[in-house]
Image (cartoon, rainbow, N blue to C red):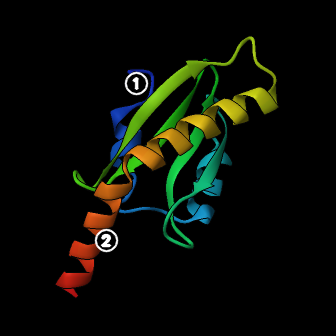
Amino acid sequence: MTDNSDTSPTFLSSLPSQPITDDIVKQIGENDNPKIRGAMGFPGSTPGAIEAFLLNMEAKTHVLVFDPTAEQWRVYESFGTEEMDHQEMIDHASDLANEWLAASLSDRITAADETDLER
């Protein structure tokens, strides 16, 4: 797992401290920033909520994930895409997102249970 300094901490801090919707991911992907080529959300454990998404930028693609214990988004892993076609990039990012979703399942369940108790 590699954090990437190419992803602006300002960008990450502009994300809400909760999972986002597919509409927000779409807005990020359609942003006027010339370095952003697109974004795509991955379905998670909560219907209607995106807990992981890919951000395809000029130099690298980043898999961003919502860390429920820290209540913030972070870069799970970044990778170069210069030798990948579009589908290979999506497949690799999907594999990484699925790896994170599986590894973080107990943390996400605990965070959801705590949120339910607070209501």
Extreme top residue here? 83
Residue 108 has which mark?
none
> Which residue in the structure is indicated by mark 1?
1
Percent of width and height locating residue 57: 61, 28
Amino acid carrying label 1: it is Met
Does the residue at mark 2 contact the one at mark 1 (Cβ under 8 Å)? no
Residue 112 has which mark?
2
Residue 33 at least partly seen = no
Look at the image and tell me in which quarter the C terminus lies: bottom left
Q: Is residue 82 left or right of residue 50?
A: right
Percent of width and height locating residue 21: 54, 66
Which residue is more in the foreground, 17 or 98?
98
Whole-number angstrom distance, CA of label 2 to CA of label 1: 25 Å
Percent of width and height locating residue 29: 65, 46
Look at the image and tell me in which quarter the N terminus lies: top left
Q: Is residue 45 left or right of residue 4?
A: right
Which residue is more in the foreground, 98 or 86?
98
Residue 101 at least partly seen = yes
Label 2 or label 1, whichever comes before in sequence order: 1
Amino acid carrying label 2: it is Ala
Q: Could you tell me which residue is drawn at 39 percent across and 51 percent down?
A: 66
- The 10 Å Cα crowd at callout 1, few under 14, some 14 to 19, many 20 or more, is few
Q: Is residue 18 left or right of residue 96?
A: left
| Above/below status of 55 relative to 70 | above
| Above/below status of 57 relative to 106 | above
